[in-house]
């Protein structure tokens, strides 16, 4: 990955550019990348299992939709609501969430967009490889981020102390 001084330099410019419209250099500054432990957990995840579970969820959602249609078909109009409305809302929300998860799952597109190359002897980038690289980067980045943020905080404190030293406070003579 990046040498520590290169990352520190890049990060100091990044935080400086953010400082005008965020909390960069303040105690309230929020780390802007995924947490390293989250990336580590993602590297341990088996995407095949996740994809299989997602397909099962889609199948169950379709079965639920078929059951809902059957119940709606054989129910009288007076007994149909609020069941039909709530189920329609539930199923459309479920469809949206499943479609979103399928689109996020396209891992190969993700690795290509980040220009990650497969290891020697592998046909494609494994999720473990991809997230391990990001975990390592995020860990280094977070360490440097904390250091640079503290430096900016210290610089602000020193500026305030200098300004305060130049203040002259006169007692009110009433």
Image (tube, rainbow, N blue to C red):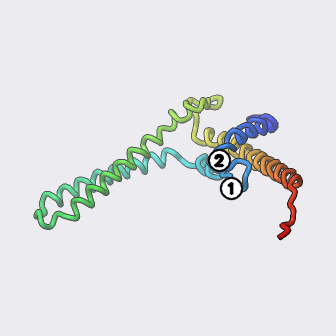
Residue 105 at x, y percent in the picture: 47, 42
Q: Which quadrant is home to the C terminus?
A: bottom right
Question: Which residue in the protein does label 1 denote?
Answer: 28
In the picture, measured across the screen, residue 147 lies left or right of residue 107, that is: right
Q: Residue at x 39, y 48 (%)?
A: 98
Question: Which residue in the protein does label 2 denote?
Answer: 22
Residue 140: image quadrant is top right
Q: Nearer the viewer, residue 28 or 158?
A: 158
In the picture, measured across the screen, residue 65 lies left or right of residue 96, that is: left
| Label placed on residue 69 | none
Q: Residue furthest left?
A: 76
Q: How many marks?
A: 2
Q: Nearer the viewer, residue 98 or 10?
A: 10
Label 2 vs 1, first from the N-terminus: 2
Q: Which quadrant is home to the N terminus?
A: top right
Residue 123 at x, y percent in the picture: 56, 29
Q: Nearer the viewer, residue 145 or 161?
A: 161
Q: Residue at x 61, y 46 (%)?
A: 43
Residue 8 at x, y percent in the picture: 78, 39
Query: Mark 2 falls on what kind of element?
Result: loop
């Amino acid at each position: 990955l990046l040498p520590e001084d290169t990352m520190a330099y890049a990060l100091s410019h990044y935080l400086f550019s953010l400082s005008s419209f965020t909390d960069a250099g303040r105690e309230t500054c929020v780390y802007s990348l995924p947490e390293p432990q989250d990336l580590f957990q993602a590297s341990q995840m088996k995407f095949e299992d996740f994809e299989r579970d997602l397909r099962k969820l889609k199948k169950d959602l379709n079965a639920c939709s078929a059951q809902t249609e059957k119940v709606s078909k054989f129910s009288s109009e007076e007994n149909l609501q609020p069941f039909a409305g709530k189920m329609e809302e539930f199923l459309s929300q479920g469809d949206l969430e499943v479609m979103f998860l399928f689109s996020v799952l396209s891992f190969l597109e993700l690795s290509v967009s980040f220009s990650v190359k497969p290891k020697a002897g592998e046909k494609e980038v494994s999720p473990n490889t991809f997230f391990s690289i990001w975990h390592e980067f995020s860990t280094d980045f977070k360490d440097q981020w904390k250091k640079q943020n503290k430096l900016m905080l210290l610089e602000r404190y020193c500026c305030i102390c200098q300004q305060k030293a130049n203040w002259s406070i006169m007692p009110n003579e009433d």
